[in-house]
Image: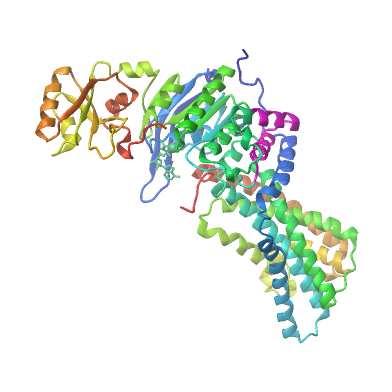
Amino acid sequence: MSEELAIHARGVTRVYKAKPSPVTALGGVDLDVEPGEYFGLLGPNGAGKTTLIKILTTLLLPTSGTARIAGFDVVNETAKIRRVINMVAGGEQSGYGLLTLREQLWMFSQFYGLPAREGWRRVDELIEITGLQEQRDQKVRTLSTGQRQKLNFARGLLNDPWVLFLDEPTLGLDVAAARDLREHTLAWKAAAPGRTLLLTTHYMVEAEQLCDRIAIVDRGKILALGTPEELRRRVQAESIFRIELDRLPANGGIAAIGALPGVLSAVPADDGVADGAGSDRVALKVALADDSALTSVVTAVAERGSSLVGLAKSEPSLEDVFVELVGRGFGDEDEADPAP
Amino acid sequence: MAVIERPATVEGLTIPDAWRSFRTAVGLGWAIESNWSDPFLFAVYTIAKPLAAAMILVVMFNVITQGQGGEFLQFLIVGSALWNVVFGVMGGLVQSILEDRERYRMMKYLVVTPTSLFPILLGRSLARVAVSFVAVILTLAVGVVLLGVELRPNILLLVPATILGLTAVMALGVFIAGWCLQLRQEAWSYPEAIAGALYLVSGAIFPIDVLPTFLHPIAYAIPTTWWLEASRRGLLGHGSPGTIGTLPDLVVLALLVVTTAVVVPLALAGFAWFMRRAREAGLLDMTTGS
Ligand SMILES: Nc1ncnc2c1ncn2[C@@H]1O[C@H](COP(=O)(O)OP(=O)(O)O)[C@@H](O)[C@H]1O
Ligand SMILES: [Mg+2]
């Protein structure tokens, strides 16, 4: 039964009391994650990812529904769950500024009940794994954002968790630090298979790179779930083109293109604008019911005063899946925000 | 290659866990809590402020009694000296819990460990408790040297009174800290209001007999009253002015034991309830400042 599952959730909802009206952050989530699986929750800001992680890590009670981690109930068996899980969140600066790295990690090793000697051994091992040897005796407040997050990640591995939760772990990190963290995550799995990861992210690349299976979430619901290949297959029937224009089309812009007959969707491409500062160039991703609709797109662009500077048929990505499911692009709600 | 499996048996929190957490929090709490890099500020807060508060009381008192109240002066000095501990403990616990959540952003990471927040909080705040004893000793020293207060310490009373009193005060502090988790930032001064109210009711500066009668049952029900009374006897060799001073030492100690034994489990249950409520409302990683 659910005992073998790393994560088992049924009908999990969460409503926050808020003014002027309550916010439904989760509208009934069912989720089964097998032991050893790396599972991704991919969705835009406000989708409910953090809320779900908080419920699964015993930080927040669900409004209704049930969830089990390693067979233990998230509401009533918190002490047992906390032995077998750990959690790392991104996007904020955390840490006791006046402690050194080693002290802070050692403190948590004690809160996880490691014997003193074993604790120090584990701390030094993790400092080495995360590449923080040079900073090990530095105070936490002197660390860069990326170093702090590596320290946070090291803390997350202290108890060698059976299920690890990473909530947007690379949010706000520079490219190199984000890549390091993703590599550490993969190395952790390689070192001993059987560990389970639940990752939330709004970076497609991160989900694809780290996860065996992915659930696409939006507005508190899981819209699709499968391996990256399975998800991509959903949009294989469509033709997806990357169109580069010298400027944004006038008169309705991208939305007008999306509304043309035969066009399923048109959104800014996730790699944003092409080269050259000061250039007005834009890149669009346009999904067509079939290739023949391309003619009307090209005509419509010209009518709106833009000229075509590039056109390529592209392989469907997870973003295309999302666009098909939700009808809008991933970054539409915040600024274009490519994975670091 | 070893495949990690879920441990066959998983234990909840054990007593050795709690003890280990407490010890760790004591050791590192000292480093987290204290910014000793500014000795001037440190001196102002730990020494000058409590001394000034005590001096103001004494001056007011002398103006009112025109220097005629020797016994009362002793009562006043000991009460205001010891109350530094209450402010230290309560302020320390509340500040620890709120700083962990809002400033260090570590509360959620503490909560997801298998240990309880309770021993961690106690350990974290012990640094501040220790510092508050500096103020106690200084205030008493001023009393002895400048104001002619005579100390006749009785270790047999003083030691149990201090241990029990600290236990009760810490339990109350933990309760208030849990309560503060529920509050928005503007309401952080509530605990100070509580400590202030206790100050008035426990006979720290007013003898209980001068309080309105409806407050007497409250005064006799709270452990801080009996802690102050037992400590006065342990320091001065005699009790407070008024009814409470006429009770035998053993009765005072027994009442301190009983009230502490009632308050500690109540405070712990209250703390657990507040934690549950914080989980329900999603307050464990909230930042109220923004
Ligand atoms: N404490 C809270 N009070 C009220 N609304 C909240 C609270 N936390 C989150 N929300 C709302 O719940 C929804 C989901 O938020 P969240 O789980 O943080 O999403 P994500 O992590 O996917 O960005 C959002 O609309 C957010 O505004
Ligand atoms: Mg989030």
Q: Is residue A64 visible?
A: no
Residue B206: % across, % down: 72, 73
A129 and A52: which one is in front?
A: A129
Residue B91 left/right relative to A290? right
Q: Quadrant of residue B18?
A: top right
Judge whether residue A121 is colored magenta: yes
A262 and B31: which one is in front?
A: B31
A236 and B19: which one is in front?
A: A236
Residue B52's place in the image compared with A84, above or below, is: below
Judge whether residue A50 is colored magenta: no
Which image quadrant shows ligand 2? top left
Query: How is this picture coloured?
Result: rainbow
Residue B190's place in the image compared with A224, above or below, is: below
Where is the C terminus of chain A found, in terms of image quarters?
top left
Q: Residue at horizontal 28%, vertical 28%?
A: A323
Q: Residue at horizontal 75%, vertical 83%?
A: B62
Q: In the displayed image of the protein, which residue is found farthest to the bottom?
A: B66
Q: Which residues are magenta?
A: A99-125
